[in-house]
Image: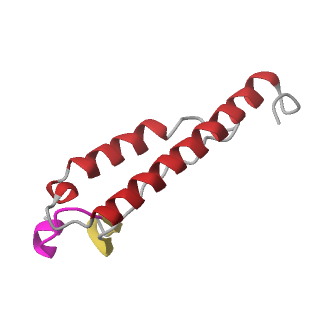
Amino acid sequence: QVFEKARMQYGRIDYTLAEGKLVVFEINSNPTVLSDPPTPFATYDPQPFADRHADALLALPQAAAPDSLPAIDAANRATLAKLRRRYEFKRLKLVLQKIFGRGGAK
């Protein structure tokens, strides 16, 4: 209902509950979900959620809009690929540290 009233199809709502009522104080119309690698103390791996978010964004009709600039699309894809490679390496390093102890992988 909040998105309908704001005439928005996508975003992230920052909200609280006050006296049992939902109070929205911000709608971020361009939220980003990036998956930092989990620390050795993490209880879950956020990678699957970040991947699902990226896939959902790419499935939006606007992702393939004919008026989209190819240079911007290419830059965005290259940046996401670079981040994924970086985080995959960090994730592997942290997993190895967790398995072999702090002094294991550097």
Q: Give the side of residue 97 with respect to residue 83, left or right.
A: right
Can residue 15 be seen in the rendering of this structure?
A: yes
Q: How many marks?
A: 0
Among the 4 quarters of the image, the one containing residue 27: bottom left
Q: Which residue corresponds to the image point at 21% horizontal and 47% vertical from the top-left?
A: 59
* Residue segment shown in magenta: 2-11
Side of 65 relative to 78 (left or right):
left
> Residue reaching furthest top?
99
Q: Nearer the viewer, residue 25 or 28?
A: 28
- Camera-side residue of 98 and 67: 67
**Residue 60 part of the magenta-drawn span:** no
Residue situated in front as seen by the camera: 77 or 39: 77
Residue 50 at what x, y percent from top left?
A: 42, 45
Residue 65 lies in quadrant: bottom left
**On screen, residue 98 above or below 32:** above
Q: Residue at x 12, y 72 (%)?
A: 7
| In magenta stretch: residue 6 | yes
Give the left or right position of residue 94, taking residue 16 as reference: right
Residue extending farthest to the right is 103
Locate the C terminus by quadrant: top right
* Res. 42 in view: no
Q: Residue furthest front?
A: 71
Quadrant of the snapshot with the N terminus: bottom left
